[in-house]
Image (cartoon, helix red, strand yellow):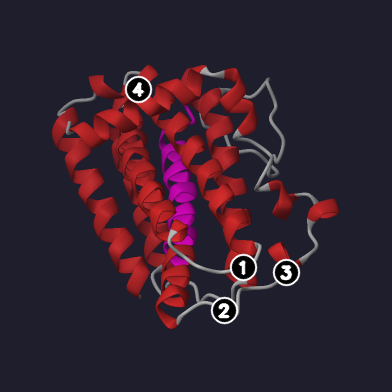
Amino acid sequence: MNWKTLNMNVLGRQLRRSPLLRTKSRGLASSAYTDPAREQGPAVTSTPNDLTPQQRKLLEAALRVDQAGEIAANWIYHGQHAVLRGDKRTGELIQVCNSISLQRNEGLTEMQEMWDQEKKHLQVMDKLQTQHQVRPTLLTDVAKVAGFGLGAATALMSKEAAMACTEAVETVIGEHYEDQLKELDAMSTTHPSIPLLKDIIREFRDDELEHLDIAVENHAQRAPAHALLSAVVGAGCKVAIELCKRV
């Protein structure tokens, strides 16, 4: 585990155990797209027209890959559920919700809540993609199949391997969101949608780091060949990110 990954693990634990940060990370920026009372104004209905061609390209790539990532994340949970739903304890953790939960429910188990958060992430990313007129990746179907396959395969290995999959994926996503925020910080525009987008990315980053911490607490690092599994899954995620930016 390199220093950057270690820092992500530490940050995830800090966010997980801070009630103030856990509360602030939910339902604020993203509620601009999930709360009908707030879905108005240029920040959520229009896209900047003062970006340079390079900045526009950066924005489109960011939203394209983020949307694809949320699609893959949801299908990873589908794959895990398909395999582990028969297990009494784990089945309760990743059971499918009949509707998207947009508010925190303290009665939900941790992994069910993680899946609900990923569903909300995807809902928001779909709206951002439409708002900013970004073409979705051509690899959407690939993301679904690969996500389901990864979730099912690691769940078939063991419950710990499924958690190790989550740990590896969320580590890469946390790093990706950090890099994305730096790129967006350099974007010069007076349009209110970009500050809102950065706030949403920060919120989702905090959610993903919390998922990482939950995976570690649920024995991800006890998975067989943990280091190898993490390296393979992490490398696959990085390749997918680069492909979805371009295709």
Q: Position of residue 150 (x, y in %)?
A: 32, 46
- Vertical order, 244 against 203 (above or below): below
Within 10 Å of the Cα at label 4, are there few (<14), some (14-19), or many (20+) other Cα atoms? Answer: many
- Vertical order, 63 against 232 (above or below): below
Q: Earlier in the sequence, mark 3 or mark 4?
A: 3
For the point 51% across and 44% down, which residue is it? Answer: 202
Q: Earlier in the sequence, mark 2 or mark 3?
A: 3
Q: Is label 2 in contact with label 1 (beta carbons under 8 Å)?
A: yes
For the point 19% across and 29% down, which residue is it? Answer: 226
According to the image, label 3 marks what residue? 45
Q: Tell me, for residue 50, which label it has, or none.
A: 2
Within 10 Å of the Cα at label 2, are there few (<14), some (14-19), or many (20+) other Cα atoms? Answer: few
Q: Position of residue 152 (x, y in %)?
A: 36, 42
Measured in 3D between alpha carbons, the distance from the residue under mark 2 to the one under mark 3, in whole angstroms, is 16 Å
Looking at the rendered image, the disc whose residue lies closer to the viewer, 4 or 2, is 2
The majority secondary structure of the magenta stretch comes to helix
Q: Tell me, for residue 216, which label it has, or none.
A: 4
164 on left or right of 180: left
Measured in 3D between alpha carbons, the distance from the residue under mark 4 to the one under mark 2, in whole angstroms, is 43 Å
Measured in 3D between alpha carbons, the distance from the residue under mark 4 to the one under mark 1, in whole angstroms, is 41 Å
For the point 70% across and 44% down, which residue is it? Answer: 99
Q: Earlier in the sequence, mark 1 or mark 3?
A: 3
- Splitting the image into 4 quarters, where does residue 14 fall? top left
Q: Nearer the viewer, residue 43 or 212?
A: 43
Looking at the rendered image, the disc whose residue lies closer to the viewer, 2 or 3, is 2
Which residues, given as a range, are shown in magenta?
64-87
According to the image, label 1 marks what residue? 190
- Vertical order, 119 against 215 (above or below): below
- Amino acid type indicated by mark 1: Thr
